[in-house]
Image (spheres, rainbow, N blue to C red):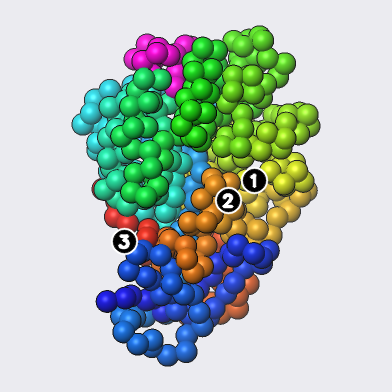
Amino acid sequence: MKRAFRGRIMTASSGGEGLRYLDDGILVLGEDGRIEAVEPWTGPPNGVLVRDVRPWLLVPGFVDAHLHYPQTRVIGSATGPLLPWLERTVFPEEARFLDERHASAVAAELTQRLAAAGTTTAVLYSSSNPTATRVLFEALARSGHRAFAGLTLMDQHCPDPLRVDADHALAACAELVRAYHGHDRGRLSFVITPRFAPTCSRALLEGAGRLAQDHGLFVQTHVAENPDECRAALAVHPFAKDYLDIYDRTGLLGERTLLAHAIHLSPDEWDRIRDRGARIAHCADSNFFLGSGRMRLADARARAIPVALGTDVAAGRTFDVRRMMSSTYDNAMCLGDPITPEDLFRLGTLGGAEALGIARETGSLEAGKDADFCVIELAAYVQEPNDVLARIVFSSDTTPVRETYVRGKRVVGG
Ligand SMILES: [Zn+2]
């Protein structure tokens, strides 16, 4: 029997700037997992099993465009800034992912936390270990999340247990592409994932660029997060005229490239990001926690560069994309370029899907898209649409996620 949810509904929509809000609406799910209709409630439709969740709210599932699976257990480790934090906190933990049992246990925790936050789409860095990456994909295949995930590439300037030479790493990537890319009608994707320029040789970067090109894969990496990192990147790759040029000249910068942080960039680098059609994962909370700086969101928006939000766990302190909306607001306010709650909601849902090239499938509650959504607890006394939006964007702890669905199926962690 066909199913539907009755409740309050808030969503961005593909055609318009503003948000659509229904204070009593119905979300009808087709048997194929797609949304059949999103309409004002006018009475029970024939032959449909309706679940009434009022006064709670239905919203699109959130899109977390940047986080690190093997950092799930080291969240909140205040050993920054970036380079010392990697040495003290991240690399020792990532080395533990050589142990498959550890990898399995953490993958279960990760999927549980994503589901609890209402995240339906996640873009993940794995560790540099192929087996751990396979474990991650298997966990995602079970949990039901839509995800992009990739083996983190590092063949230099990192501890020995994490170093994988270029030939082995690229062969492992090709194997993972065969096993998981496009799994379940595109629910899982493999993404080429150089950690960042300092830990990758030029040969590895070029090989990764070719692999992405050959298979039409997304590329994700970090760029210009921290001034010391910027200096290290250029010291390691003196052929480049600036940080972005390292990725550009190794074939990694294009329309399927997702760049995280992008704080310390010149106007010329911003122009080249626009010209190549690349996208940005904005990680405001992480940027605060590691003292990395404040990304000028206005620089991206002025150039119409697609932007998604990333928690960047574990430099970010939460799996909650709504906390990123809130941090993005703070960041933009401090820079004197305020952003509206409507735009923040859009960035964390449909805007994220657009940046990942999957907006035809997900990111908003519209007929024909996959039924990727979550149910949020909302007090009946919060009634005005602007108040509802404010609670969702700025107060996620008073509006907790109760259920999360991908393609109409409840997403379960663990
Ligand atoms: Zn990161």
Q: Earlier in the sequence, mark 2 or mark 3?
A: 2
Q: Quadrant of residue 345?
A: bottom right
User: How far is disc 1 from disc 3 in space, using C-alphas?
Assistant: 29 Å
Q: Are marks 2 and 1 in contact (CB under 8 Å)?
A: yes
| Residue at point 49%, 18% (across, down) | 207
For disc 2, the marked residue is 354
Q: Which mark is residue 306?
A: 1
For disc 3, the marked residue is 410
| Residue at point 49%, 75% (across, down) | 38
Element assignment for label 2: helix
Tell me if 39 is positioned left or right of 29 in this view: right
Instruction: Point out residue 350 in the picture as x, y percentages from the top left corner.
Output: 56, 56
Q: Nearer the viewer, residue 250 or 392?
A: 250
Residue type beneath disc 3: Arg
Q: Residues within 10 Å of mark 2 (few under 14, many from 20)?
A: many
Residue type beneath disc 1: Pro
Q: Are marks 1 and 3 in contact (CB under 8 Å)?
A: no
